[in-house]
């Protein structure tokens, strides 16, 4: 997975960058088809805004959160992204399971 960071009107501390990278790499266990991750962090007056975009396999997952502190904004946006990736994975698995169950219950043609 290729991860790019972009900052607007601020500096991103190295510790936050490393923590975000680690959490993004953990997402590969849910979906190994994530090709790119873009992390955008910005400051507007008192608001710290974090946006994460995951792309791969023809689809994108985007989340944007804001908070009073940069660390909290990144934590919130990563929680939302993890939840969305997990929900997408569960949805695909449940659909596949239902199709497989229907095919098994049909009588075989001889």
Image (tube, helix red, strand yellow):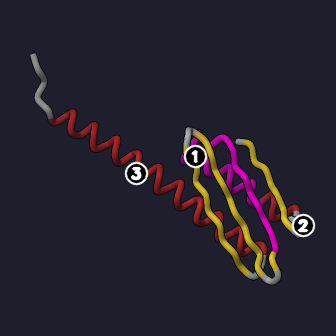
Image marks 3 and 2: residues in contact by CB distance under 8 Å: no
Chain part drawn in magenta: 19-43
Residue at (34% x, 41% y) in the render: 96
Task: Residue 14 in the image: state x and y as whole percent.
Answer: 87, 61
- Between tags 1 and 2, which lies in front? 2
At label 3, counting other C-alpha atoms closer than 10 Å, the crowd grade (few under 14, some 14-19, many 20 or more) is few
- Between tags 3 and 2, which lies in front? 2
Task: Residue 60 in the image: state x and y as whole percent.
Answer: 58, 49
Q: CA distance from mark 3 to mark 2?
A: 38 Å
Q: What residue is pinned by disc 1?
A: 29
Query: Please, what secondary structure does the residue beneath circle 1 have?
Result: helix
Task: Residue 69 in the image: state x and y as whole percent.
Answer: 77, 78
Closer to the camera in the image, 83 or 50: 50
| Residue 61 in the image: above or below residue 10 | above
For residue 11, which numbered disc appears in the image? 2
Query: Please, what secondary structure does the residue beneath circle 2 have?
Result: loop
Lower position in the chain sequence, tag 1 or tag 2:
2
Image marks 1 and 2: residues in contact by CB distance under 8 Å: no
* Horizontal relation, residue 63 to residue 13: left or right: left
* Horizontal relation, residue 46 to residue 63: left or right: right
Task: Residue 110 in the image: state x and y as whole percent.
Answer: 9, 16
Q: CA distance from mark 3 to mark 1?
A: 15 Å
| Residue 102 in the image: above or below residue 71 | above
Residue at (52% x, 58% y) in the render: 84
Quarter of the figure with the N terminus: top right
Q: What residue is pinned by disc 3?
A: 91
For residue 40, which numbered disc appears in the image? none
Residue at (58% x, 46% y) in the render: 29
* Horizontal relation, residue 9 to residue 53: left or right: right
């Amino acid at each position: 997975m290729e991860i790019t960071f972009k900052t607007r009107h601020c500096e991103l501390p190295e510790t936050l960058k490393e923590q975000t990278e680690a959490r993004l790499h953990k997402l590969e266990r849910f979906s190994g088809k994530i090709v790119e991750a873009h992390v955008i962090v910005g400051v507007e007056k008192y608001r710290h805004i974090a946006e994460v975009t995951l792309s791969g396999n023809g689809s994108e997952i985007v989340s944007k959160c804001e908070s009073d502190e940069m660390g909290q904004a990144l934590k919130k946006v990563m929680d939302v992204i993890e939840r969305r990736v997990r929900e997408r994975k569960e949805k695909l698995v449940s659909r596949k399971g239902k199709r497989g169950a229907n095919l098994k219950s049909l009588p075989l043609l001889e």
